[in-house]
Image (cartoon, rainbow, N blue to C red):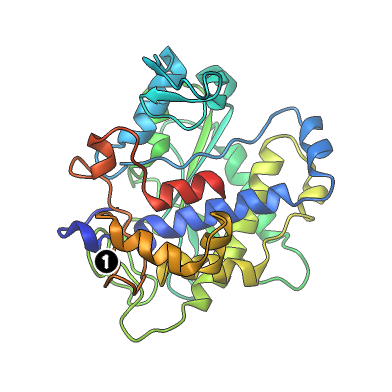
C-alpha cells in the first residue's frame, strides 16, 4: 500500500484484504481431506504469490515475471543454505525458480476485495481476448453453486469499457506469457471503501475507523471470498467441482486473522506462527520503522507501505514482520 505518511499506510482494503484472502485460501487448500494425494493427482499444481512494491509500478510482480523468464541470477549464495536461498538478491526460497512462463496456465489476481454490503465482486478480463472466459465460467458457476447453508458471494463481469486494473496480472500481460488471466476485485470502475462507500485508496483513511473495536463482518466476508478463491484455484488446476465443495474456510479463524492485519498485528496467530508471544511481537513492532505501532507497547495494525525509502529495500538481509509472517504462515 501507500500513503502520504508512510507509517499510516495501513492499506486495510488496498493491501490487507487481498493478503488475508490469499492466506485463507491457501490454508483451506492445505487442509482439504487427503490434500497431498489429491494435489499430486491434479494435472496442474497451484502456486500462491504475494508481491511487494506493487504500488510502485508493480516492482514485485514485474521482477518475478522477469526472473522466471530469464532466471534469478543469484550473485550471493547463502553459505548456510546453499541449495535453498540466495543473499543477493535476498530470496528466502529458490523453489519457485523451477517455474517458467510456459508452465503457468492461469493467473487469478485479487484486489481490494472488501465491498459495501450487498455489492458484487467484479471479474475484470483482458480486452481483446476470449480465453479468460474459462475463468469467468468457473468463478460464476462456483459462486452460484455454493455450499448449502453458506451465504452467496455475488460476482459480475466488469464493464468492458474499463481498462484492466493495474495488478500483477498486468506484469504477466506485458511479457510473452500466453495463459488465461482474470482480476477479481471489489470495484467496477471506481474504488470504493467497504464502510463509507467513498474511495479511501492509498490514504490514511484506508483503515478500521476509530472507535470500531471489532471488524468481524469484514473477516466473515473475506472467509466467503477466500472459499470461492480456493475452489476456483482447485477447479482451474483440473480438480472436480464436487470435490471443490469440500474446501471451506473457517470463519472464526478468518475473523481472527483479519483482525491481526486490520486492528492489532500483535495477535495470537502471529505469535504462534513465530513461536513467540504477543508481547514479544509488540516489542518487535516498536523497534521497526516500517510498522504503525502507536507506542512502544501498544501494538496496532501493521503498515503495508513499500517503497524506495523502506529500510529493507536498501539494507540487505532485513525483512519486515509482515513478510516474515507470510513466509512462515
Mark 1 packing: few (<14 Cα in 10 Å), some, or many (20+)?
some
Give the left or right position of residue 276, taking residue 213 as reference.
right
Observer-nearest residue: 247 or 293? 293
Q: Compared with residue 103, is residue 309 higher up or lower down, i.e. above or below?
A: below
| Residue under the point 49% across and 59% down | 121
Q: Position of residue 263 (x, y in %)?
A: 41, 72
Looking at the image, which residue is at 38% across and 21% down? 66
Q: As displayed, is residue 254 above or below residue 237?
A: below
Where is 265 relative to 310, above or below?
below
Numbered disc 1: secondary structure: loop
Residue 127 occupies quadrant = top left
- Comparing 189 with 47, the one in front is 47
Where, by quadrant of the figure, is residue 17 drawn?
bottom left
Q: Position of residue 6 (x, y in %)?
A: 20, 56
| Viewer-closest of 85 and 144 | 85
How far across and down, in percent of the image, does residue 234 sit? 70, 42
**Can see residue 55?**
yes
* Residue at screen point 23% across, 64% down: 8
Query: Which quadrant of the view contains residue 46?
Result: top right
Task: State the residue position of label 1.
Answer: 200
Indicate left or right for 16 with 100 as reference: left
Amino acid at each position: 500500500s501507500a500513503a502520504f505518511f508512510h507509517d499510516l499506510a495501513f492499506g486495510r482494503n488496498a493491501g490487507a484484504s487481498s493478503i488475508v484472502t490469499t492466506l485463507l485460501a491457501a490454508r483451506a487448500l492445505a487442509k482439504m481431506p487427503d490434500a497431498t494425494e489429491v494435489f499430486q493427482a491434479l494435472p496442474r499444481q497451484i502456486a500462491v504469490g504475494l508481491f511487494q512494491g506493487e504500488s510502485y509500478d508493480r516492482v514485485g510482480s514485474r521482477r518475478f515475471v522477469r526472473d522466471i523468464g530469464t532466471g534469478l541470477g543469484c550473485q550471493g549464495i547463502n553459505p548456510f543454505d546453499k541449495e535453498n536461498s540466495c543473499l543477493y538478491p535476498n530470496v528466502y526460497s529458490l523453489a519457485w525458480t523451477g517455474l517458467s512462463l510456459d508452465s503457468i496456465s492461469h493467473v487469478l489476481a485479487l484486489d481490494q476485495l472488501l465491498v459495501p454490503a450487498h455489492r458484487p465482486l467484479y471479474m475484470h478480463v483482458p480486452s481483446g481476448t476470449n480465453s479468460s472466459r474459462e475463468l469467468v465460467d468457473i468463478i460464476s458457476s462456483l459462486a452460484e453453486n455454493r455450499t448449502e447453508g453458506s451465504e452467496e458471494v455475488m460476482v459480475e463481469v466488469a464493464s468492458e469499457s474499463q481498462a484492466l486494473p493495474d495488478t500483477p496480472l498486468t506484469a504477466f500481460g506485458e511479457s510473452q506469457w500466453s495463459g488465461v488471466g482474470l482480476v477479481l476485485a471489489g470495484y467496477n470502475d471506481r474504488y470504493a471503501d467497504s464502510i463509507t462507500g467513498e474511495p479511501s485508496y492509498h490514504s490514511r483513511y484506508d483503515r478500521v475507523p476509530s472507535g470500531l473495536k471489532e471488524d468481524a463482518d469484514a473477516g466473515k466476508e473475506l472467509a466467503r471470498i477466500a472459499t470461492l478463491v480456493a475452489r476456483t484455484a482447485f477447479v482451474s488446476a483440473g480438480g472436480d467441482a464436487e470435490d471443490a465443495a469440500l474446501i471451506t474456510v473457517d470463519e472464526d479463524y478468518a475473523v481472527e486473522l483479519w483482525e491481526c492485519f486490520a486492528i492489532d498485528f500483535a495477535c495470537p496467530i502471529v505469535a504462534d506462527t513465530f513461536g513467540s508471544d504477543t508481547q514479544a511481537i509488540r516489542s518487535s513492532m516498536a523497534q521497526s520503522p516500517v510498522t504503525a505501532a502507536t507506542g512502544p507497547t501498544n501494538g496496532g495494525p501493521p503498515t503495508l507501505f513499500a517503497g524506495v525509502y523502506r529500510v529493507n529495500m536498501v539494507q540487505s538481509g532485513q525483512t519486515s514482520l509482515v513478510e516474515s509472517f507470510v513466509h512462515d504462515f
